[in-house]
């Protein structure tokens, strides 16, 4: 339907007069304006979406790493955000040590990660001061790990170690302090 402009003005004036504030007659139509018609037909704005949740941080110790110490090689398996297991083999002239380590990441101080852990293993020596034999040992340690690159971390730990060794007809039991350093490359 096409209405002449004069009828549209009369209709608009009627709507304004009948829909005055404070009037008890609620059956009167609301005023219509040209801008109201345009906004009524405009598309609704998209609903506001909450910001996307940030991706969960990757757990520092839940990955696989290869480590090189002096004079050892290590393979670290992350068990979750705070625990890891390691297989360690140390080799020197006349000495072989195979051990397992478990470590717990109990806190952070800036970029440093604080660790507590334990290690136990088996040692074989041959030709050390003309003595050959084997032994077992255990160690408790506390340490720090520093990530100086995305996949490279330096670990330093220290702790008391107990060694029980036997050779031919001799046995030795001792406690000493062990200082370990290793450079880890995280594969994942």
Image (cartoon, helix red, strand yellow):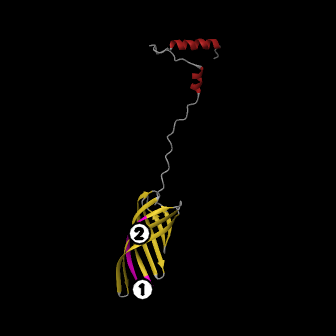
Q: Are marks 1 and 2 in contact (CB under 8 Å)?
A: no
At x 35%, y 83%, the residue is 171
Task: Give the side of residue 82 with respect to residue 5, left or right.
Answer: left
Q: Position of residue 2 (x, y in %)?
A: 65, 16
Q: Label 2: few (<14), some or many (≥20) within 10 Å?
A: some
Looking at the rendering, the stretch of residues picked out in magenta corresponds to: 125-143
> Which residue does the image show at 48% across and 70% down from the upper left?
74
From the image, state whether disc 1 or disc 2 is nearer to you.
Answer: 2
Residue 116 location (% of width, % of height): 39, 64
Location of the N terminus by quadrant is top right
Which residue is more in the foreground, 152 or 66? 152
Instruction: First in sequence, mark 1 or 2: give its number.
Output: 1
Which secondary structure type mostly characterizes the magenta part of the structure? Answer: strand
Residue 156: image tag: none
Q: Residue at x 40, y 77 (%)?
A: 122
Question: Which of the 4 quarters of the picture holds residue 24?
Answer: top left
Residue 84 shown in magenta: no
Query: Mark 1 packing: few (<14 Cα in 10 Å), some, or many (20+)?
Result: some
Q: Nearer the viewer, residue 143 or 125?
A: 143
**Residue occupied by mark 1:** 132
**For the residues marked 1 and 2, what is the alpha-carbon distance in whole angstroms?**
27 Å
Residue on which the image places disc 2? 158
On screen, residue 137 versus residue 186, left or right, reads left
- Is residue 138 a member of the stretch shown in magenta? yes
52 sits to left or right of 135: right
Instruction: Say what secondary structure mark 2 lies in.
Output: strand
Q: Position of residue 9 (x, y in %)?
A: 60, 13
Q: Quadrant of residue 179?
A: bottom left
The count of marks equals 2
**Image height of 48 relative to 42, above or below:** below
Instruction: Write down the quadrant of residue 80 in the picture.
Output: bottom left
Q: Position of residue 121 (x, y in %)?
A: 40, 74
């Amino acid at each position: 339907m096409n209405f002449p402009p004069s009828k549209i003005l009369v209709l608009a004036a009627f709507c304004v007069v009948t829909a005055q504030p404070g009037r008890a007659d609620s059956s009167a139509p609301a005023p219509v304006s040209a801008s109201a018609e345009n906004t009524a037909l405009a598309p609704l704005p998209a609903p506001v979406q909450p910001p996307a949740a940030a991706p969960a941080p990757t757990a520092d110790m839940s990955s696989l790493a290869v480590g090189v110490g002096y004079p050892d090689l290590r393979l670290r398996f992350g068990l979750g955000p705070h625990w890891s297991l390691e297989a360690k083999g140390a080799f020197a002239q006349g000495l072989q040590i195979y051990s397992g380590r478990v470590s717990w990441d109990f806190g952070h101080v800036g970029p440093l990660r604080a660790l507590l852990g334990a290690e136990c293993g088996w040692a074989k020596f041959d030709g050390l001061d003309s003595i050959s034999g084997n032994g077992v040992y255990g160690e408790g340690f506390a340490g720090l790990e520093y990530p100086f690159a995305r996949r490279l971390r330096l670990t330093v730990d220290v702790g008391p170690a107990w060694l029980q060794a036997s050779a031919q007809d001799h046995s030795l039991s001792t406690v000493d302090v062990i200082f370990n350093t290793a450079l880890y490359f995280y594969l994942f």
